Image: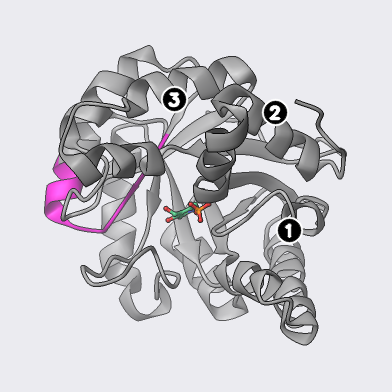
Amino acid sequence: MMTKNVSATAPLLGVNIDHVATLRQARGVTYPDPVAAALVCEQAGADGITLHLREDRRHILDADVYRMKPLLKTRMNLEMATTNEMLEIALEIKPEWVCLVPERREELTTEGGLDIAGQVDNLKSYIEALHGAGIQVSLFIDPEPTQIDAAIHCGADAIELHTGKYSEATLSQDESTINKEYNRIKQATEYALSVNNEFIINAGHGLTRANVHPIASIPGIHELNIGHALIADSVFMGLENAVKAMQAAMQGKEYQV
Ligand code: PXP
């Protein structure tokens, strides 16, 4: 069982290594290896490794997940859709965490949160099956009180708040949307903690060194899952430095390479 991060300084960092596999799949070759990348991230100080086994296997492949699990020293957070196929794989691999996400074939990335309120019974039994194998479950949701209530009702151990709209607004420097979306994430965190103070609240999507500090500073956020921008940074500074630089940015600090 994972204990909750009560650090007053910064949340934990889970590194999403899907984008290493995206580079590999672009050529259909065997490099770069996302498993090797995960181990470098751990050595650099990442608190966990996140990977998304998509139905269309566009980046991470089954073999990556099987190979990675026994090698990780931190923990695996396996993102997946709520399907029977994925349930079977998760029960076999037994990652420490599963994060349930919505999935659409035509999307570039996970574009919105799960609509839990509309599928409570289905999710309850799905989560029970994962719990039966000792796997903790997080639900990727939009920062909305109705979704938070439904997540707690379903028996989830954690939620991950979708920060995509906040992140997009920071890229277009749309101040009023940045403030609005930041407040939604902050208020959703406060709301979830007011319902259950022990509940684990993670966040992620689209976070960069430039926009991460306000989100990392929200009291009660346990962990941030960050991939695309961190792997992009690694092109210029190397993967180990990119992990360290993101951790520094989460604390509002500069990192010298
Ligand atoms: N959290 C979840 C649930 C995701 O689906 C993703 C994207 O795969 C991330 C975090 C990381 O997002 P990004 O790659 O934009 O940092």
> Which residue type does callout 1 highlight?
Asn
Query: In the figure, 251 relative to 99: above or below?
Result: above
Label 3 sits on residue = 38
Give the image location of residue 192, x and y in percent: 67, 64
Is residue 238 shown left or right of residue 130? Answer: right
Is residue 123 shown left or right of residue 210? Answer: left
Task: Name the outermost residue toward the front.
Answer: 236
Asked if marks 1 and 2 touch (Cβ < 8 Å), the reply is no
Marks 1 and 2, how far apart at CA? 16 Å
Q: Residues within 10 Å of mark 2 (few under 14, many from 20)?
A: many
Q: Secondary structure at mark 1?
A: loop
> Which residue type does callout 2 highlight?
Lys
Quadrant housing the C terminus: top right
Q: Is mark 3 within 8 Å of ligand 1?
A: no
Q: Which mark is residue 244?
A: 2
When asked about the image quadrant of residue 45, the answer is top right
Give the image location of residue 159, x and y in percent: 54, 56
Out of 210 and 87, give the one closest to the viewer. 210
Q: Is mark 1 within 8 Å of ligand 1?
A: no
Residue at the spot x=38%, y=37% of the render? Answer: 20
When asked about the image quadrant of residue 78, the answer is top left
Out of 73 and 46, give the one closest to the viewer. 46
Out of 136 and 245, give the one closest to the viewer. 245
Q: Secondary structure at mark 3?
A: helix
- Write the start and end of the magenta stretch as one range: 77-88
Asked if marks 3 and 2 touch (Cβ < 8 Å), the reply is no
Q: Earlier in the sequence, mark 3 or mark 1?
A: 3
Query: In the figure, 166 relative to 60: above or below?
Result: below
Label 1 sits on residue = 211
Residue at the spot x=37%, y=42% of the render? Answer: 18
Give the image location of residue 246, x and y in percent: 69, 38
